[in-house]
């Protein structure tokens, strides 16, 4: 039975309680625009003092580092109706992404509606509503809560076997290659951040080694002079197994035999794990600036022994081992810390009125997916206000529907890939669903010209 709502929390007659959006990073901004375009009342809370989420390197706790760039190209990465500037490089730097996000927020009138410095302590069910409590003790009651706090704030830190006495850090704490100067550095982890940081170490550390527990498929950032996601996207209309049959031999030709560079052969087929989009690591391995080793077997003081029997001393072990998808403001309602249980990766199945955007794990750029999720949820909330049949149908689906979003792929069994979806399959499913429900997945406002990169840079510096 639902808890009673105190009189002060009950909405006055003829007034719908507002939606609460938590977080003003990319996902939160996409949600705010979708809600505002439908005229849906909302409150937007952000604990930091600026827009940008983790893309603001000054935001406490961000995993960002100085050399960070987008791993998807600018032409396929922006929000609908708001392209990234033409003068941006194929893979923009983190400060350019931040400038883009702040320009997007200003262009749609979102910035002035954000309550900065509003850190949420807890979200709690209150009858048919949701109470949001801030760290300063303030509480508000809302009809819907959309959590957009992001998935890369809470590091996964495995134990290092043995008795290592050197410095152990997670990549969350890493900022600059200057931190490696004169040191022997071991980077553990084969994700995109781990490969980037190993390349930083190649240029600044006394010794740079990367430890990978398995083999991976490496996708160059450019193929035939074009961003690889553009080249690969031309085959996205094909079934994934057929697309893989074409691309996998091509990658073997482009990158060669990985064992020549000390890497293991991939123990899985292409697309079955998150892709490593990196050209520079192979370059540094080929030149001996970075050395590849298998998994750590044991440590003793500064000595690290690897699974192949080799051993050497390191001053620093940097764990680029990923993140838990924790939602500390409402963990009890989201369940698994690695993979929140969400219909279409954005709507709670068990708790009506609770949503999340920004927690999808997939094999493409994320902003266009955040955008579609945002418009889907805005249409549902709008339909609920009007009592439409489409809203009732979506409410049924969120409780009962379990679509296959793998496109025929068998994803790896690792924790990261629990709940993983294929981006093409996901978009196709959402497109089909939106047509069935009569809900557009793009904004209704006319496109806004891309921000001038120089003005966007000055805008970001002025806010800082």
Image (cartoon, rainbow, N blue to C red):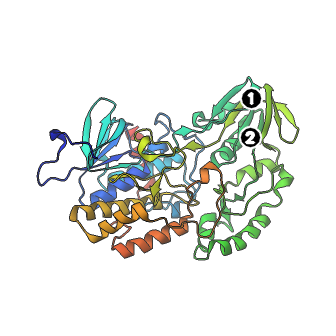
CA distance for labels 2 and 1: 11 Å
Q: Among all residues in the image, which is located at the extreme left?
A: 13
Q: Residue at left 36%, top 65%?
A: 396
Work out whether residue 59 or residue 358 is closer to the camera in this orientation and state it: 358
Q: Position of residue 140 (x, y in %)?
A: 25, 40
Q: Is residue 455 visible?
A: no
Residue, disc 2: 202
Q: Position of residue 124 (x, y in %)?
A: 33, 40
Q: Is residue 216 above or below residue 132?
A: below
Q: Residue at left 77%, top 29%?
A: 314
- Choose top left, top right, bottom left or bottom right for residue 82: bottom left
Work out whether residue 266 or residue 47 is closer to the camera in this orientation and state it: 266
Q: Residue at left 36%, top 55%?
A: 31
Badge 2 element:
helix
Q: Is residue 310 above or below residue 105?
A: above
Identify the mark at residue 447; answer none if there is no mark: none
- Quarter of the figure that contains the C terminus: top left
Q: Residues within 10 Å of mark 2 (few under 14, many from 20)?
A: many
Q: Earlier in the sequence, mark 2 or mark 1?
A: 1
Q: Position of residue 92 (x, y in %)?
A: 54, 53
Work out whether residue 455 or residue 408 is closer to the camera in this orientation and state it: 408
Q: Is residue 216 above or below residue 428?
A: above
Q: Is residue 169 above or below residue 12?
A: above
Residue, disc 1: 183
Q: Position of residue 29 (x, y in %)?
A: 37, 52
């Amino acid at each position: 039975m639902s808890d009673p709502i105190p009189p002060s929390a009950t909405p006055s007659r003829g007034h719908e309680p507002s939606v609460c959006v938590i977080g003003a990073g990319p996902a939160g901004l996409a949600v705010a625009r979708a809600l505002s375009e439908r005229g849906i009342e909302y409150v937007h809370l952000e604990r930091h003092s600026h827009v940008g989420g983790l893309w603001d390197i000054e935001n406490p706790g961000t995993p960002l580092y100085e050399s960070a760039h987008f791993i998807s190209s600018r032409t396929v990465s922006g929000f609908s109706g708001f392209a990234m500037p033409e003068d941006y490089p194929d893979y923009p730097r983190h400060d350019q992404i931040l400038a883009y996000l702040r320009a997007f927020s200003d262009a749609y009138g979102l910035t002035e509606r954000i309550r900065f410095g509003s850190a949420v302590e807890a979200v709690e069910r209150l009858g048919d509503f949701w109470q949001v409590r801030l760290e300063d003790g303030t509480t508000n009651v809302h009809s819907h809560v959309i959590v957009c706090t992001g998935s890369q704030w809470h590091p996964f830190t495995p134990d290092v076997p043995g008795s290592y006495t050197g410095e152990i850090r997670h990549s969350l704490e890493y900022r600059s290659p200057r931190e490696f100067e004169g040191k022997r550095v071991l980077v553990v982890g084969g994700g995109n951040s781990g490969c980037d940081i190993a390349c930083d170490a190649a240029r600044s550390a006394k010794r740079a080694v990367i430890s990978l527990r398995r083999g991976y498929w490496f996708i160059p950032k450019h193929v035939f002079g074009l961003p690889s996601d553009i080249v690969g996207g031309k085959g996205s209309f094909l079934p994934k197994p057929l697309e893989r049959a074409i691309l996998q031999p091509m990658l073997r030709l482009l990158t060669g035999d990985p064992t020549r560079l000390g890497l293991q052969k991939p123990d899985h087929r292409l697309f079955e794990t998150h892709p490593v989009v990196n050209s520079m690591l192979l370059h540094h391995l080929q030149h001996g600036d970075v050395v590849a080793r298998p998994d750590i077997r044991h440590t003793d003081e500064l000595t690290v022994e690897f699974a192949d029997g080799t051993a050497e001393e390191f001053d620093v072990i940097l764990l680029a081992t990923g993140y838990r998808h924790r939602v500390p403001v409402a963990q009890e309602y989201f369940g698994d810390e690695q993979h929140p249980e969400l219909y279409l990766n954005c709507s709670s199945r068990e708790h009506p009125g609770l949503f999340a955007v920004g927690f999808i794990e997939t094999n493409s750029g994320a902003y266009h997916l955040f955008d579609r999720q945002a418009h889907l949820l805005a249409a549902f909330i709008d339909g609920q206000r009007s009592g439409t049949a489409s809203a009732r149908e979506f409410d049924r689906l969120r409780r009962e529907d379990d679509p296959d979003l793998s496109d025929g792929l068998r994803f790896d069994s690792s924790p990261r890939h629990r709940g993983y979806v294929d981006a093409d399959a996901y978009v196709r499913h959402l497109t089909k669903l939106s047509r069935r429900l009569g809900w557009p997945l793009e904004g209704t406002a006319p496109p806004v010209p891309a921000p001038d990169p120089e003005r966007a840079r000055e805008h970001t510096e002025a806010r800082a």
